[in-house]
Amino acid sequence: MPSDSPSSPLIHWLGGQALTLELPPPATLHLQRGIWRLAEQLQGHADLREIIPGMNNLTLEFHPGTNPAGWPARLRRLWRQVDALAETSREVEIPVRYGGASGPDLETVARRCGLDPADVISRHAASRYTVFFMGFLPGFAYLGGMDPALAMPRRDTPRPCVPAGSVAIGGDQTAVYPAASPGGWHIIGRSDMRLFDPARQPPCPLRPGDRVRFIPMELG
Amino acid sequence: MLEITKAGPLATVQDQGRFGSRHLGVGRAGAMDGLALAVANCLAGNPPDAPGLEITLPPAGFLLHRDGMLALAGADCAATLDGMPVWPGWRTPFRAGQRLALQAPRNGMRAYLALDGGIDVPKLMESASTDLMAGFGGWQGRALRDGDRLPLGEPRLSKPRLGVWLPQPGNRIRIRPGPEYARLPAPDRERLWNHPWQLTARSNRMGYRLAGPTLRLEQPMEMPSHGALPGLIQLPPDGQPIMLMADAQATGGYPRLAMVLAADLWQLGQARLGSHLHFLLASREDEVRAEQELRRYLRRIERLCDEN
């Protein structure tokens, strides 16, 4: 695919029962759309136990007992033929209470970015984000497209426990923690939206390719 | 019903794991020693992937509220039923009101308890396993506590006593080189193979942190996040490998040194903190053979249990 793909993908084995297709950097939204599309095409294939899109890569785990010897060639062929996933019209809005007890790091982020807390909020809420892939925790979506002015390194020491719903900034990405977990990102707000419910179908309201907007909630 | 009178430090409901949801960030969970759970299940008259209990470093105690059959496998915890010994690898009948007690294991790390009918908890995303990271599945998404009362499935017909041979876990773990292995300088590759690796106290169901000689890639590298699986051995910047286990996160970003053979993962489930592991280089043929041997062993046990 992707006509502007500069070179062919690399294929790495992870032992004999999994492999990863990797595209040379840089990661672009265009290539990422090809990854999502390929993952979608492979969905339900009898050989495959897991299909895991990553950043610029796709990992396949095979069922025990299958012989995956033919898969590297097949993957290369599929990649050449794949069309980028058409831009999805799905847009998900996530309401957020910024700052205060909900966003204990808002002041720090503002200071380190040389902005007012109100600027951080308006810049964070102004962007349209894209879900690049899901990982780390169930329902944890890596969101690309943040205002570069808000990028900042992770905390020196991760917090042992970040509350569920925390809206946080780490590097040039932002995300919402779907469950309480340890976390090294800076927390600027909190959302009550449920991002993972194993009893629901589908369990995650977000999926790769979705467009996300954060809606600041009025305090009151 | 199975009442937990003494839960011990970490006991959870597990089956053979949750598959097909890693793209949602949902990990595998499941028994750390899946072989022991499968054997215990077969003996108890259950399918190998029925939900049972994983009991980490007992002591632990249970009160049984109906008649039935149980089987233990994995670490030998000098178990007793109302004071009478219960051997691991044996099918043992029990009566309502009896108490099962497990002591600290002499070796090994985890004991598996299967009861006929299985632990009756709902499947979430196609598995009954407890996902401790996300807090769902198993029994209320958490480790068991004293006083928990777990429902059991329908009891099966009573069967004769039966014992099977249980394989003993070793500390020689077969691995295949990973994508970034070739970026290790030759002397560091030697160190990976020739030095024992100690399992540190900072290890858990998510990952084993190993201590040994410091390994460094020829050039440090920043990698985009990619799919991660149990058995993957990563090399973080501090040069001490991390081996991902059942509760491993769905994606990761550290260089991938090697992959443990799936057929050897059960042995790691029995490795004790502070003990040493040795890595052996395996070929694709070794991997296929190891997988076949494991499946042949399980089929033999299943057949034996079906016939008796």
Image: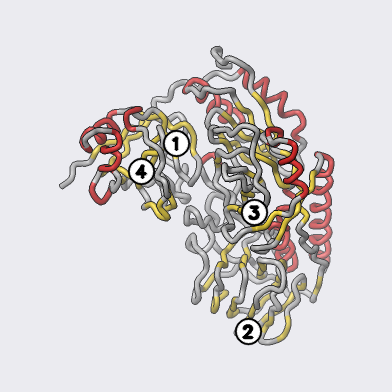
Indicate left or right for B246 with B139 as reference.
Answer: right
Local crowd size for mark 2, using a 10 Å CA cut-off: few (<14), some (14–19), many (≥20): some
Looking at numbered disc 4 in the image, what kind of residue is underneath it? His
**Pointer 4 residue:** A186
**Residue B127: image x %, image y %?**
58, 53
Chain under callout 3:
B
Do labels 2 and 1 touch, CB within 8 Å? no
Evaluate whether label 4 is on the same chain as label 1. yes
Indicate left or right for B168 with A150 as reference.
Answer: right
Q: CA distance from mark 4 to mark 1?
A: 15 Å
Q: State the residue at coordinates (64%, 53%).
A: B210
Q: Nearer the viewer, mark 3 or mark 4?
A: 3
Res B257 → quadrant? top right
Q: CA distance from mark 2 to mark 1?
A: 51 Å
**Pointer 1 residue:** A142
Q: State the residue at coordinates (64%, 40%).
A: B216
Do labels 3 and 1 touch, CB within 8 Å? no
Q: CA distance from mark 3 to mark 1?
A: 31 Å
Local crowd size for mark 3, using a 10 Å CA cut-off: few (<14), some (14–19), many (≥20): some
Chain under callout 2:
B
- Marking on residue B211: 3
Q: Which element is circle 1 on?
A: strand
**Residue B251: image x %, image y %?**
55, 41
